[in-house]
Amino acid sequence: MITFFVCLALLLIGYATYGAFVEKVFHPDDRETPCTRLEDGVDYAPIAPWRAFLIQLLNIAGLGPIFGALSGAIWGPSVMLWIVFGTIFAGAVHDFLSGMLSMRNDGASIAEITGIYLGPTMKTVMRIFSVVLLVMVGVVFMVGPAGLLALLTPNVLDVKFWTIIVLVYYFLATLLPIDKIIGKLYPIFGICLIIMAIGIAGATIVNNVNGSAPMLEMTLQNLHPDGKPIWPFMFITVACGAISGFHATQSPMIARCLTSEKDGRRIFYGAMVAEGIIALVWAAAGCAFYEKTGGLMTGLAAANGGNSTTVYQMSIGLLGPVGGVLAMIGVIACPITSGDTAFRSARLTIADWFKIDQKDPKKRLALSFPLLLVGYFISFLDYNVVWRYFSWSNQTLAMIALWAGATYLAKFVSKNASFIAAVPATFMSAVSCTYIMMAGEGLGLSASISYPVGIVFAVAMLGIFLFKCILKSDTKTA
């Protein structure tokens, strides 16, 4: 229990201190924001800061901080260190820079932002990469909640039925103006999400106090029953609970709705810290809830980590039938409210790419329908395979977004300031490269080959950045 509270305190302190430092480095000002200059009543629409925070939290907090954190917990309490330090120094910095750079560039999508700061080739790569990722996110967050809803309606409504229902909702949320569904429902869902996390945390603490399910204290030992290495697998598996490239696709939506740059820290950095807390709660609860054999996380591994069944078992087991159902509603709200905005972001990315005006409902329909149709057919593939590809794509996109942020800071703020993004970008470069070299869904190479290649790739990326942005460029005015 001490580990949990120390980690929780570190997340809050990180927001208050490092978050303030990052904000000071970027220096938000009083310039006119995109929503006041480009208001169109569809995607550019002013939203109150408190509402924007809840929407941003729900946009980014899909299944990642729940399924991902539970899957990461198979390695043991060490996952909590990645959640804490990944959130403070990588994930929240990534989300803040993505949102603020979008505000500085008329609410541009992450692909367009990448093109501005990393060049046209990377813009094309990111356009394709982000649309593919967003569709996969939409699929993951379509099938996941459908499975959870099916567990609440056994022998009555199956997964296929709920998948179609979720898909219909996604269609409406993708097509309609942001303030018609998202702006009205998300604050309610946000409250459910927060209550759910508090309930799971409270029940886990009570079980620790009464001795029925002790919480694990920190150890760096690998507790994975199969001995799968922590590096890089745990860092990819946790995904949204520490850092997520998916967030870079979501932040521009809120960037188009803020009336002041000075709200950026509490909304972009703050929402990521809140997601880190949610991930911490589920990781700690998963470590305590499931049976251990010989000190290894055999119970959670046997349940295949984070999935619909484990979330259902934990919700009912910790909170009882009524509380469990309420917790499940909060969990279901997470992926649904990220899946719809994933498809919406895909629409906006394509619209930015081909300069398609989105005021016309027919043009929005022409983009939305094919995206959702493709997502529906992908939903028939093996969920676990789609999740693994989503996780790697997610972290790779985060790597690219961080390099774009570092380049901006080097050119428009100061060369020293750029390292708040360049350091985590280098780290994520090593993670992403090493994983795709080692993983079965990648090249499946040995650790003796994958580790050196991952390190060389990360060093090469850092070297290119240092040469182009530190040694050769001059600081300009943003």
Image: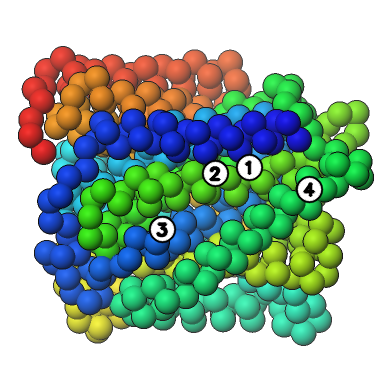
* CB-based contact (under 8 Å), mark 2 and mark 1: yes
The answer to whether residue 226 is visible is no
The residue that disc 4 covers is 204
On the image, the x and y values in percent for residue 90 come to: 43, 34
Kindly indicate whether the residue at mark 3 contacts the one at mark 2 (C-beta within 8 angstroms).
no
- Mark 3 → mark 4, Cα distance in angstroms: 27 Å
Q: Which residue is mark 1?
A: 280
Tell me if label 2 and label 4 are in contact, CB under 8 Å: no
Mark 1 or 3: the one toward you = 3
- Mark 2, secondary structure of its residue: helix
Taking 345 as reference, is 156 left or right?
Answer: right
Q: Which image quadrant is residue 209 in?
A: top right
At mark 3, the secondary structure is helix
* Mark toward the viewer: 2 or 4: 4
Question: Which amino acid, mark 3?
Answer: Phe
Q: How many residues crowd mark 4 within 10 Å: few (<14), some (14–19), many (20+)?
A: many
Q: Nearer the viewer, residue 430 or 94?
A: 94
The residue positioned 52% from the left and 55% from the top of the image is 61
Q: Which quadrant is home to the C terminus?
A: top left
Q: Which residue is mark 3?
A: 53
Distance from label 1 to label 3 (Cα)?
A: 20 Å
Of the two numbered discs 4 and 1 on the same chain, state the one appearing first in sequence: 4
Q: Amino acid at mark 2?
A: Gly
Q: Residues within 10 Å of mark 1 (few under 14, many from 20)?
A: many
- Residue matched to label 2: 276
The residue depicted at 52 percent of the width and 72 percent of the height is 188
Residue type, numbered disc 1: Leu
Residue at 85% over, 47% down = 207
